Amino acid sequence: MKIKLRKLFGMSAGEIAFRLKHKVSLLQERSQFRSGKFTWDEAAWSKRLCCDVEVPLEVGQLSEWWQNHMRTRDEPAMLLSPDELSECCDLYQQLFLSRHDDLIAAGDAVCEGRLSLLGEEVSLDDPIDWHRDPKTGHQWDAEFHGDVEFAFCQTGGDDVKYVWELGRQEYLIDCAKAYRLTGDARYADRVAQIALSWIESNPYLDGVHWASTLEVAVRALSWLWSYQLCRPHFPIDADAHLAWIQSFYQHGTYLHRHLSYYFSPNNHLIGEATALYLLGCFFPEFDESGAWREHGWSVVSEYYQRQYYADGGSTEQATFYHNYCLGFLLLAVLTRQRRKNPVPKEMLACIERALQFTMWMTRSDGTVPRIGDVDNARSIAFENPPLWDFRNLLSLGAILFRRGDMKQVAGGFSEDALWLLGREGYQQYCELESCSPQETSRAFLQSGYYVMRSGWREAEHHLAFDCGPIAAGLHADAVPSSAHGHSDLLSFTLAAHGKPLIVDGGFYTYDEDPLWHRYFREASAHNTLLVDGASHANFHPSNAWSSVATPESMQWHSTSLFEYVESGHAGFFGVVPAVRHRRALFWDMADKWVILDRVEGEGVHNVEVFFHFAPCEATMLGDRQGVAIKTAQGALAELVLFEGPNCQIEMIAGKSGPEGGWIGTGYGYRQRAPVARFFGQFQLPVAFSFTIESLHSPSTENG
């Protein structure tokens, strides 16, 4: 109750008014749901679905009208017309022929009911049980969407993400692509069968699949792409086709009334508004389509700037959600441009800066550092790149903004760009001259990151220093607020010779197990320093923080001989009087990095410094206080306490429990990886100097 009161007192008058209005609206909707007022007859459906038909449809004509209409309608398209999609199929065979067998295998797997959902291999029942958790078998009840309780992280329980992943149906896109490329009707049959199975089992507003607005939005996008790829030759009867059209309408009307303004005004809201806008664009026949377009675009154009700092970094301080939100914005803008409607210059500039941030964070292996929460989702889901690889967005950005540097880092024309921009987009990409960015270091002052890199080609060094806030909008007092950022102040990641060496602890799941969830969010799962075991904020289940520390301003110096950056904070939760941590990173522009830590305060305190390695062999050095590292690729490196008081050193590897030597590599994925812990009890002030030196790399040995 105290926490709820603190949250209430932390709300603005506008938020309180909105939440009260939402409560009243939900009560009315619940009453209408239970009285059956959302079950419409054919006449009511005709008014909703065919508002512009000049001659009123007679009873029994609605399904035939829609089937014939969508077989012949060319515009509006989902970015590409049927003819342009046919060109894409030809181009796909030229550009991505090596992926053809994998795509067919993916389509076959969907046809056979074999799916991979957040790391779980799942076999679908026949008929599909949409309310059964595919991982645990938990059965979700049929009840009004506003009454579904799906957060269990305080006590542990069934993670709703798995049943939601089943309901998102993004796997249908592979099946639809297989149909478009081969003409084999069984793929289109399977797409329709799964969509119609879901519709039959999930009446409007009933159950867990209507309990989250973002889930409704993602499913709508999956359907829009799959429907567009499979039409105009859908091998289903008119009544089944109409059921799908009606569900499209229900998804739009739900989104129109349930956007997450104050509940999740981040990537959720942008994704929901984008789906609403696209539904309104693709179905102008619907009576509310104009309102959907206006509502969706107005939210995107108002809230986009809240998602990114002026330097392009995400206000959520999570690299995965940075790119997830960015993909939604690109979808909305590209659709807007396709319709020849104006897009504000300020919005385009914001998107370009966000893409530039992604470009700087992209390492030689094509991935970005794992910072903050993750749920493995892709807002643009035509291709399946490695989990932390977002070069598909840079490929789109290169075309949209005529950026040769983005083309260079993208590494090639992406399949996503093909299905969104077609042959014309490919021609523009080919005409663009590729070039490397001129700089090799960049300070992102507002979001609080500093990037040092040796270059932009293969086998380059890349260091990212995280000295920004945990997330924007969190409270320095006891008011808790949810965020995707972690307690990672002054943490860093390092890739040497193109391969990750020092990595972020990552993330695992939201609600499956509270101990694992909390571990990956707290400071000890990051490459930073702790005092008396304290993180930089007070943790609240499931992903909230309060009493958040404020980082100090970043200072840096860049020359042709070295790179230097430093920052600090004085916010270890519960440590009174306050203790200040100041960290500086120095790079000699070759193969050695120095980490300088100074801890200022009074009295004797326990101090710990953590270093999380990518999976490797890590052993204690016999002659010095440090660790020898040998990676799977054969690279050698050393981490040494170069100067400072005598410390104890613990190598954490192969132990049980969350703190037993793990990294979270994606939602539902974790991997064994060693952790070095330097610790002791010290009279403050105290200082430490660590060196990390890359001694040998297979790539450099081979020239």
Image (spheres, rainbow, N blue to C red):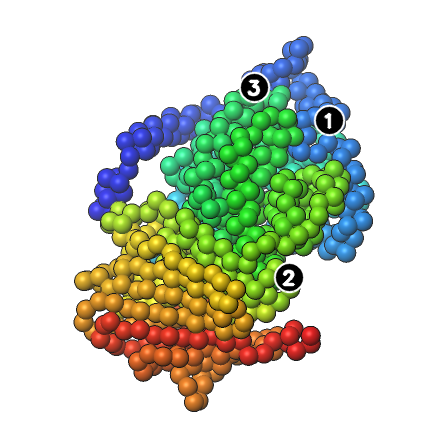
Using the numbered discs, state the Cα–Cα distance from disc 1 to disc 2 in whole angstroms.
43 Å
First along the sequence among labels 1 and 3: 1
Front position in the image: 204 or 361: 361
Using the numbered discs, state the Cα–Cα distance from disc 2 to disc 3 in whole angstroms.
52 Å
Foreground tag (2 vs 3) = 2
Foreground tag (1 vs 2) = 2
Residue visible at 28% across and 68% down in the picture? 599
Residue visible at 53% across and 38% down in the picture? 349
- Tag 2: amino acid: Arg
- The vertical placement of 63 against 662, above or below, is above
Secondary structure at badge 3 equals loop
Front position in the image: 344 or 113: 344
Instruction: Give the labeled residue for mark 1.
Output: 74
* Residue 102: x %, y % from top left: 73, 55
* Residue 20: x %, y % from top left: 31, 30
Secondary structure at badge 2 equals loop
| Left or right, 444 with reference to 368 | left
In contact (CB < 8 Å): disc 1 and disc 2 = no
On-image quarter of the N terminus: top left
- Tag 3: amino acid: Asp
Instruction: Give the labeled residue for mark 2.
Output: 457
Instruction: Give the labeled residue for mark 3.
Output: 287
Secondary structure at badge 1 equals loop
- The vertical placement of 169 against 607, above or below, is above
- Tag 1: amino acid: Asp
On-image quarter of the C terminus: bottom right
Using the numbered discs, state the Cα–Cα distance from disc 1 to disc 3 in whole angstroms.
20 Å
Front position in the image: 183 or 243: 183
| Left or right, 337 with reference to 102 | left
The disc placed on residue 529 is none
Can you tell which quarter of the image residue 241 is in?
A: top right
First along the sequence among labels 1 and 2: 1
